[in-house]
Amino acid sequence: MNTNDCCPAALPDWAMGMNCAVTVCDADGIIVYMNERSRRTFAARGGADLIGHSLIPYHNERSQSIIRHMLATGESNCYTIEKQGVRKMIYQTPWRDASGAVAGLVEISMVIPEEMPHYVRE
C-alpha cells in the first residue's frame, strides 16, 4: 500500500521521514496512517503495522475516555511522558474533513531533552 493512499486526506511523503512518530486514526478510532517512526515504536511493543486496527484496545479506560472526548468535542490533548529514561511530548489533536467535522485524530510523539529552553515572546 502506498502511504499516500491510506486515507481521504492522505498525508504527503514528508510525514513518513519525520523524526517523530505520527499516527492518524479516523472518527471511529481505526488507524489509517503510521509513519516510519510510529511503526518502529509499535514494533517494539509487538505490532509494527496497525493500519486498519482500532486504537481503542491499545489504551486503558482513562485514555479511551480522553480519545472519545477529543473525537466528540474537537479538543486537543498534550502531555509529557518518560519511559525507560526517554522523555517524550505527546500532542493529540483532531483533524477535520472538508466540511469541518472531526474526521479523526493525529498523534505526534517526539523525544524531548531533559532540560529544554523556554522562551517568552511578545
Image (cartoon, rainbow, N blue to C red):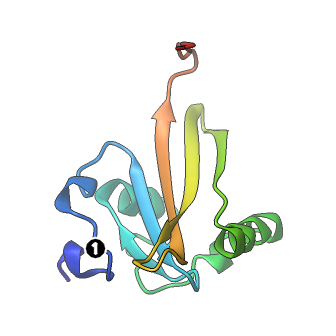
Q: Give the farthest residue toward the right.
A: 62
**Which residue is pictured at 39% across the width and 77% down the height?**
98
| Vertical side of 93 occupied by 87: above or below | above
List x then y, in percent, for residue 88. Answer: 55, 38
| Label 1 packing within 10 angstroms: few (<14), some (14-19), many (20+) | few
Q: Quadrant of the C terminus?
A: top right
* 112, 40: nearer the viewer: 112
**Residue lying at 70% horizontally and 75% vertically, measured from the top left:** 72
Tell me if residue 39 can be seen: yes
Callout 1, which amino acid? Ala
The quadrant holding residue 35 is: bottom left
- The mark tally for this picture is 1
Location of residue 12 (image quadrant) = bottom left
Return the residue at label 1.
10
At 68% across and 67% down in the image, what residue appears? 70
Residue 75 x, y percent position in the rendering: 67, 60
Q: Which secondary structure, mark 1?
A: loop
Q: Position of residue 36 (x, y in %)?
A: 30, 58
Comparing 71 with 88, the one in front is 71
Q: Is residue 50 visible?
A: no
Quadrant of residue 1 within the rendered picture: bottom left
Where does the image place residue 57, in percent across and percent down from the top left? 66, 79
Q: Is residue 45 left or right of residue 61?
A: left
Q: Nearer the viewer, residue 101 or 35?
A: 101
